[in-house]
Image (tube, rainbow, N blue to C red):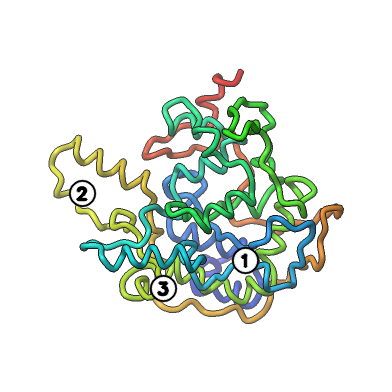
Amino acid sequence: KRSLEDSSPSNMTLKWQNGVISNYEYLMYVNNSADRTLNNLSQYPVYPWILTDYTSSSIDISNPDIYRDLTKPIGALTPKRLKSILDRYTDMPDPKFMYGSHYSTPGYVTYYLMRSQPDLMLCLMGGKFDHPDRVFSGIAESWNNVLTNSSDFKELIPQFYDGDGSFLENRRKINFGKRQNGSVVDHVELPPWAANPRDFVTKMRAGLESDYVSANLHHWIDLIFGYKQRGDFAEKSQNVFHNLCYPGSVDLDSILDPNEKNSVVTQILEFGQVPQQVFSKPHPERRMAAPYPTLAVINSNSNVEEEIPDKVESAQPNSNRRISVVGKAWTNSSCQRRFQ
């Protein structure tokens, strides 16, 4: 029989260090430990952007040059943008912040899931979709935005590394409108190295489980769930967000007016929240690479059908899953009649 100690933090970290569980599984465990779950849009699991090449016809998973620097938060990856952010931060009165938006919000989750679960975006945005030029249209475009846009610091969600990639397809043939360049918003535009959505997710998963990521993932965990999340270490790591993003930053009990309290709570939930801190000391490194195969040189003509290991919490869609949207629980089918 499996004991309760099998899933204790120290034991799970030890399993990850020794390659017993995958990077994906461990990240889901850490997310769950921080009270982030697939059932709550305001506390949805957060996963990192890993790859940086979404324009080539092939990728070499063993090449460290195609990976994002996991020692830095997403907003600090581009020197030019970071300089502008730090210049503003220096002149800002207290409470200071470097990033005016977060890496995980209900709006970002619905941005990624608008095709597979359009009801989420409709219920979050009052019954309509976002402007066609602002919706999730292409992988390369979204990656470029998080590198250059002054207010876009979004990370990824588990579906990019698990499942069949159906969230990237407009299987319902929903009319999302036309963009200013005349293109119709339909399926998400994939990198040339991906033959189809399933192939894209498989190769993204191969990147997540690569030797490079296994050797560097602890740095990203320090930023999102660990000791670089707040305080002096966060400032030194260029990882400071708006005050409202941090749990406990506002004393809600001191707000007596119910309307004002509801307004503040809604603002906090929609603005994005830093996860509950799971680790207070530097996270240990992985001692060995994960026992999952990496894909050497993969091109767009490959037909990869790699077995995905068992999950801690599946990212596959579940029509019976109850999801909390800004504090309101409802079933995924609640807006389904809009498309019938």
Q: Which label is found at residue 23?
A: 1
Give the left or right position of residue 251, taking residue 214 as reference. left
The local secondary structure at tag 2 comes to: helix
Which tag, 1 or 2, sits closer to the chain's start? 1
State the mark number for residue 237.
3
Q: Mark 1 and mark 2: span between their CA atoms?
A: 37 Å
**Residue sitting at 52 percent across and 79 percent down?**
284
Identify which residue is drawn at 27% across, 63% down: 96
Quadrant including the N terminus: bottom right
Query: Where is 228 relative to 269, above or below?
Result: below
Tell me which corner region of the image, top left, top right, bottom left or bottom right, holds residue 185: top right
* Amino acid residing under circle 3: Ser
Residue 331 visible (yes or no): no
The residue lying furthest to the bottom in this view is 287
Q: Is residue 128 left or right of residue 136?
A: left
* Label 2 with label 3: CB-CB less than 8 Å: no
